[in-house]
Image (cartoon, rainbow, N blue to C red):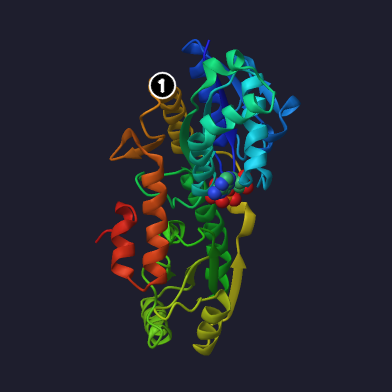
């Protein structure tokens, strides 16, 4: 029986539990054995109790849960060859030669590196006497399949990452809460949302909550004139009878000189307009709560696809990342997706903002 390990790594997101459930159950259905690897890559590096076979019933009730019940961690040891050697040893000890990783671009890069190093690691484990040639014979190649779990929706080659819509839902709920008090007092609220250097959450939250103004990294505000523009637009909305002002600031918001735009910068400007202004930092509530229906769906269909991809992978095919494009579940070369993702950040840092917009997913296209 093929043995597959599944792990969640990097920042947590809603839907990661549903991924584990789908991989475990699709694996069992397709005649595999599935091991839960606890605490991200630490589970591979340390082995023992952190690498545990999961049965059908072990993941019962996991479909809707937020966070990840097999834990996630930033594992420093896995960044070192020594740590990955230990990971290979623990996997071979359990007869595991396939890994489904749900995480962000860092986690997926680590996975791909592990796969490319695998034959060398196995050789070393024979040279140093850990295993005999015969013992490692069935495990000459490692199969890696990536799933993107991230609230930021910051991965290229997929329209949506697992967790992004749940996080968006949390943000919208919170802004709705704020709206009632804002309108009561005719106040202005500056709401800071997560997303690292991706503006998807902020842009979508702005649209879904009817914000007055949005700051995102991909379309930087003009350093010279954003304050004037913000004032004019907010005043125009007030003149139409709006009793509240809502400004959404992405975590990575910048101006076109690449200077960070903070909630305090925006607050200052709104105060100058004479508005009673408050800043709300949503913080970790954005990662919390149950997964919305779309993330449960995405995690389930992609988890099943990941197991199929494991079974169909050959040593010569590049590691696939499971994505969703135009409502179709697809496989794309993992490292190409990571490379493209990184090129967005590079484009922004080089002030090629139009390129950054184009490289981002279709949400940002004009
Ligand atoms: P994310 O997956 O959300 O981008 P990180 O970049 O923190 O999060 O990566 C999560 C974990 O993945 C790291 O703590 C480390 O264990 C592993 N990892 C990330 N990058 C690499 C790398 N280049 N080589 C090996 N392991 C890596």
Q: Is residue 36 left or right of residue 300?
A: right
Q: Is residue 359 left or right of residue 51?
A: left
Closer-to-camera residue (171/316): 316
Give SS at disc 1. helix
Instruction: Indicate the quadrant containing the C terminus: top left, top right, bottom left or bottom right.
Output: bottom left
Closer-to-camera residue (113/206): 113
Viewer can see residue 241: yes
- Residue at (42% x, 70% y) in the render: 349
Whether residue 172 is situated above or below residue 213 in the rendered picture = above
- Residue at (37% x, 49% y) in the render: 156
In the rendered image, residue 318, in percent from the top left (x then y), is placed at: 38, 34
Find the residue positioned furthest to the left.
Answer: 366
Q: Which residue is mark 1?
A: 308
In the rendered image, residue 180, in percent from the top left (x then y), is placed at: 55, 63
Find the residue positioned furthest to the right.
Answer: 49
Closer-to-camera residue (187/224): 224
Viewer can see residue 10: no
In the rendered image, residue 76, in percent from the top left (x then y), is placed at: 67, 48
* Residue 63: quarter of image: top right
- Residue at (51% x, 83% y) in the render: 270
Q: Is residue 357 left or right of residue 8?
A: left
Whether residue 257 is situated above or below residue 165 in the rendered picture = below
Q: Is residue 195 left or right of residue 351?
A: right
Whether residue 148 is situated above or below residue 21 in the rendered picture = below
Closer-to-camera residue (209/180): 209
In the rendered image, residue 305, in percent from the top left (x then y), is placed at: 41, 26
């Amino acid at each position: 029986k093929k043995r597959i390990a599944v792990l969640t790594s990097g920042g947590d997101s809603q839907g990661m539990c549903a991924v584990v459930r789908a991989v475990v159950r699709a694996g069992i259905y397709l005649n595999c054995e599935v091991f839960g690897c606890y605490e991200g890559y630490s589970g591979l590096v340390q082995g023992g109790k952190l690498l545990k076979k999961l049965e059908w019933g072990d993941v019962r009730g996991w479909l809707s849960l937020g966070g990840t019940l097999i834990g996630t961690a930033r594992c420093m040891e896995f960044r070192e060859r020594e740590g990955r050697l230990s990971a290979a040893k623990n996997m071979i000890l359990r007869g595991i030669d396939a890994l489904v990783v749900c995480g962000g671009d860092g986690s997926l890069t680590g996975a791909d590196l592990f796969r490319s190093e695998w034959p060398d690691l196995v050789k070393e484990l024979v040279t140093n006497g850990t295993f005999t040639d015969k013992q490692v014979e069935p495990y000459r190649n490692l199969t890696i399949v990536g799933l993107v779990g991230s609230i930021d929706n910051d991965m290229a080659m997929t329209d949506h990452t697992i967790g992004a819509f749940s996080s968006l839902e949390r943000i919208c709920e919170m802004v709705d809460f704020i709206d009632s008090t804002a309108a009561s007092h005719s106040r202005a609220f500056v709401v800071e949302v997560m997303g690292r250097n991706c503006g998807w959450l902020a842009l979508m939250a702005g649209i879904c909550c009817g914000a007055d103004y949005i700051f995102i990294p991909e379309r930087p505000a003009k350093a010279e004139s954003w304050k004037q523009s913000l004032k004019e637009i907010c005043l125009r909305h007030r003149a139409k009878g709006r009793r509240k002002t809502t400004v959404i600031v992405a975590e990575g918001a910048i101006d076109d000189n690449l200077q960070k735009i903070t909630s305090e910068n925006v607050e200052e400007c709104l105060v100058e307009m004479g508005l009673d202004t408050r800043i709300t930092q949503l913080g970790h509530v954005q990662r919390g709560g149950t997964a919305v229906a779309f993330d449960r769906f995405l995690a389930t269909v992609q988890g099943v696809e990941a197991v199929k991809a494991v079974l169909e992978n050959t040593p010569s095919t590049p590691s696939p990342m499971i994505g969703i494009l135009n409502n179709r579940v697809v496989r794309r070369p993992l490292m190409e997706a990571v490379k493209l993702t990184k090129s967005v950040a590079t484009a922004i840092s080089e002030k090629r903002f139009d390129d950054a917009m184009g490289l981002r997913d279709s949400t940002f296209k004009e």
